[in-house]
Image: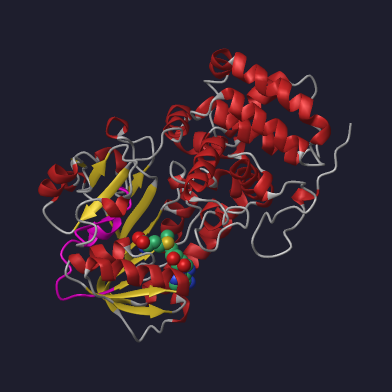
Amino acid sequence: MVLSDTSTGKPKNKQAGNRNPRESFSRQSMKPGLEARIAATRILAAVIDRKTSLDGMLDPEHGNPAFLPLNDADRGLVKAILQSALRHLPRIDAIIGQLLDNPLPEGARSLHHLLVVAAAQMLYLDVPDHSAVDLAVEQAGGDPRSRRFAKLVNAILRRIGREKSALLASVEDLPCMPEWFMQRLTDVYGEEHALAIAASQLEPPTIDLTVKSDAIGWAERLGGQIMPSGSIRLDRFRGSIPSLEGFDEGAWWVQDAAAALPAQLFGDLSGKRVADLCAAPGGKTAQLVMAGGNVLAVEQSKSRLKRLEGNLARLALSAEIRCVNLLAMDAAESFDAILLDAPCSSTGTTRRHPDVLWTKDLSDITKLASVQEGLLRHALTLLKPGGRLVFSNCSIDPTEGEDVVSRVLADDAGLQLVPIDPADWPGLEMAITPKGEFRTTPAMLPDLGGLDGFYAAVIAKT
Ligand SMILES: C[S@@+](CC[C@H](N)C(=O)[O-])C[C@H]1O[C@@H](n2cnc3c(N)ncnc32)[C@H](O)[C@@H]1O
């Protein structure tokens, strides 16, 4: 049995996953929920087959063409389906595999994605089984690539409905990460820690806020708890952030507790000239301004810089802003303190962005490490003697953290690592390496709801 599937071909324009003209649905005649399911299936295909990141495709104005016509409720449903499907993909695949007599044909990508979307709804979301099955069968019937498998779709999904508990139990020990990533985590952190990271990834993330001041007061008002980073955690908050007290007046901003650490490593910045070299969307810029710095925020992406400007305006904080590639900055311009929060694989943020695991691989990690090394070497030329630079990123792989810093330090005797003192960070001692760098992972502080994976090191120039 051979299926052809052109959906794995390159998209015709920059927006991945355009409506396939061969699908025979018209919007008006669709059952409620079907359009959302079709959108979720297309976007899932773009993530898995074309390595397209989810954030851009779910952008309310510039997102995937299948996403844009949906109403708010359907958009919410699509997001929930995709988060669940990507978070649990290896388990869903294993369950579907158990129910098939023969593996799905190599080319049957659209059939695979359709089954994954329906199974995610049935196994991990509160969608009634009969409605998930009916819509999946209708979806299969309306797509010439899957039409002849409509009976198979019906049979598999009905069995998932009937045998849900046993099927879920049969996969509960399977880590929900791609094999290459699980292997890499095991090599770096050991099996136990790697399994704990994989398990933490199954939990929806918490929302953390960084406050301008009065953390105790805001924690009480918002019903949150104060984290060892000083952040306020709103555990399992699911509402609308802008509706929270303090948003309009700019009293706080959303920032994971681990992401709040690097900018704090400078201490008081009063009177100092500070550069935030990879600044957007600006969470760390805001911290540097609040620490008293005279801050220049540098960012090469115009659209991301707009977000930074909007964020600083809401917070009523001011910084000098420059849209430039930091590699073009001249060493004649020097700074007392520099934060380089470098672009990275984002593998520390898989609780929030489960697509990262399916859009990145080891070669991306190696490439990004080399970009980071170039950025770090250049950033250090902009640092005054006696100044400090904090290098950070949200990768969980030491290739993009510890290894970059140790190579750069080994080449220049005028640079030293300033060890972070565990005594200064009660509650986060486990996140400080023997050399004195921050290395958080999502498996840390499990009783408080975990942390993003982050790396940060302080470098001094003599
Ligand atoms: C990890 S994000 C920074 C997050 C930010 N520090 C925060 O806390 O909100 C990395 C940013 O660096 C920017 N970037 C990447 N390469 C750059 C370069 N060569 N020059 C300037 N900005 C760059 C990216 O556009 C991206 O916005």
Does the magenta portion include 268?
Answer: yes
Say left or right for 261 vs 180.
Answer: left
Quadrant the C terminus occupies = bottom left
122 vs 29, left or right, is left
In percent of width and height, residue 227 lies at: 22, 42
Quarter of the picture holding the N terminus: top right
Q: Is residue 414 visible?
A: no
Q: Is 290 placed above or below 362 here?
A: below
272 with respect to 201 (left or right): left
- Say whether residue 51 is left or right of residue 336: right
As drawn, the residue found furthest toward the front would be: 28
Pick the residue in front: 103 or 180: 103
Residue 425 pos. (x, y %): 20, 45
Residue at the right extreme?
1
Overall secondary structure of the magenta section: loop
**Relative to residue 365, is residue 300 depicted above or below?**
below
- Residue displayed at 65% across by 33% down: 135
Task: Give residue 259's position: percent from left, percent from top.
Answer: 33, 52
Which residue corresponds to the image point at 83% horizontal and 32% vertical from the top-left? Answer: 148
Residue 170 makes an appearance in the image: yes
User: In the rendered structure, which segment of residues is drawn in magenta?
Assistant: 250-274
Q: How is the image coloured?
A: secondary structure
